[in-house]
Image (cartoon, helix red, strand yellow):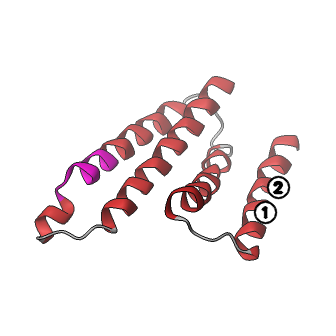
Amino acid sequence: MIKYAGILLTGTFISAISQVLLKKSALKKYDSVLREYLNLEVFFAYLLFVIATLMSIIAYKGIPLSMGPLLEATGYIYITIFGIAIFKEKMNRRKLMALLCIVMGIVFYSVF
């Protein structure tokens, strides 16, 4: 079961990377609408989403359905870290409290 949980966590991390690529692409200016959607960054981001989805399918073969959303909630943590590190977003008290709730929920579910 640990192996499948690792696969799901890795897929969630890959999905977070994909979201960062899409945001970076959205922040750029393009000379046409077609180029905005048909460029290497967007294509690679969607390819990563497909890989993450396949990893989720594989992971659900070995973990209980009730554990999946719990592990996928770690994506919020990855996205927050990427937002701060890459996009220089500010961490405020509300975001910190939300992340603490997510982490406490994961720990609570894992222990009990």
Residue count near mark 2 (Cα–Cα under 10 Å), binned few <14, some 14–19, many ≥20: few
Residue 57 relative to residue 95: left or right: left
Give the answer, above or below, for where 10 lies relative to 77. above
Residue range highlighted in magenta: 38-46
Give the answer, above or below, for where 58 lies relative to 14. above
Image spot of residue 57 (x, y percent):
47, 36
Image spot of residue 37 (x, y percent):
20, 62
Q: Residue at x 57, y 69 (%)?
A: 89
Q: Quadrant of the N terminus?
A: top right
Main SS of the magenta part reads: helix
Q: Give the label on residue 104, or none.
A: 2
Q: Nearer the viewer, residue 32 or 54?
A: 32
Q: What amino acid is found at the position of numbered circle 2 in the picture?
A: Met
Q: What amino acid is found at the position of numbered circle 1 in the picture?
A: Cys
Q: Quadrant of the C terminus?
A: top right
Image spot of residue 43 (x, y percent):
24, 49
Asked if the residue under mark 2 is in contact with the one under mark 1, i.e. CB atoms within 8 Å, the reply is: yes
Report the Cα–Cα distance between label 1 and label 2: 5 Å
Q: Secondary structure at mark 2?
A: helix
Q: Give the label on residue 101, or none.
A: 1
**Residue 18 visible in this rendered orientation of the protein:** yes
